[in-house]
């Protein structure tokens, strides 16, 4: 498995609302089109109304590469970028977990 956490900081409340709309559509398309994406969970950060976090788990690095190359993901990136003041990506090596199993 291959995983990452991404934090997005939106520029203002209007941008955060638009980011949430784009995220809902992205999650729908990832769910429909990406069998190698095992977890694609999004959240608002408690106490920080302009911050969002994605937790993503992929079957392997090839599945992540396919995700990044997908047209719907490239479109999401292009549309979200003007809404943000910052992005932080942390790549993870998954350890012990409940609910995550590698799929062949």
Image (cartoon, rainbow, N blue to C red):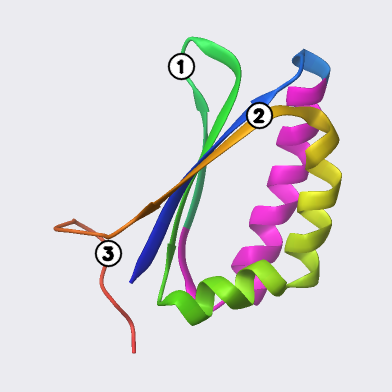
Dot 3: element: loop
Residue at the farthest top position: 47
On the image, the x and y values in percent for residue 55 come to 45, 48
Count neighbours of disc 3 (C-alpha within 10 A) and say few if under 14, some if 14 to 19, many if 20 or more.
few
On the image, the x and y values in percent for residue 41 come to 49, 48
Residue assigned mark 1: 46
Prevailing secondary structure of the magenta residues: helix
Of marks 1 and 2, the one in the foreground: 2
**Considering the image in quadrants, where does the C terminus appear?**
bottom left
Dot 2: element: strand
Q: From the viewer's side, name the closer residue of 50 and 62.
A: 62
Residue at the farthest bottom position: 104
- Residue in the image at 79% along x and 39% along y: 81
> Disc 1 to disc 2, how far (Cα)?
18 Å
The image quadrant that residue 12 belongs to is top right
Residue assigned mark 2: 86
On the image, the x and y values in percent for residue 24 come to 70, 46
On the image, the x and y values in percent for residue 84 come to 74, 29
Counting residues from the start of the chain, the first of labels 2 and 3 encountered is 2
- Residue in the image at 83% along x and 18% along y: 14
Tag shown at residue 100: 3
Magenta highlight range: 15-39
The image quadrant that residue 22 belongs to is top right
Counting residues from the start of the chain, the first of labels 1 and 2 encountered is 1
- Residue in the image at 78% along x and 65% along y: 72
70 to 53, vertically: above or below: below
Q: Are the residues at dot 1 and dot 3 in contact (C-beta closer than 8 Å)?
A: no
């Amino acid at each position: 498995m291959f995983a990452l956490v991404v934090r997005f900081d939106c520029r203002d409340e209007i941008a955060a609302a638009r980011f949430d709309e784009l995220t809902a559509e992205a999650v729908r398309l990832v769910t429909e089109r990406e069998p190698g994406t095992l977890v694609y969970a999004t959240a608002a950060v408690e106490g920080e109304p302009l911050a969002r976090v994605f937790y993503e788990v992929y079957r392997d690095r090839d599945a992540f590469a396919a995700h990044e190359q997908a047209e719907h993901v490239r479109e999401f990136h292009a549309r979200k970028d003007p809404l943000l003041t910052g992005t932080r990506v942390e790549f993870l090596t998954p350890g012990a977990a409940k609910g995550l199993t590698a799929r062949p």
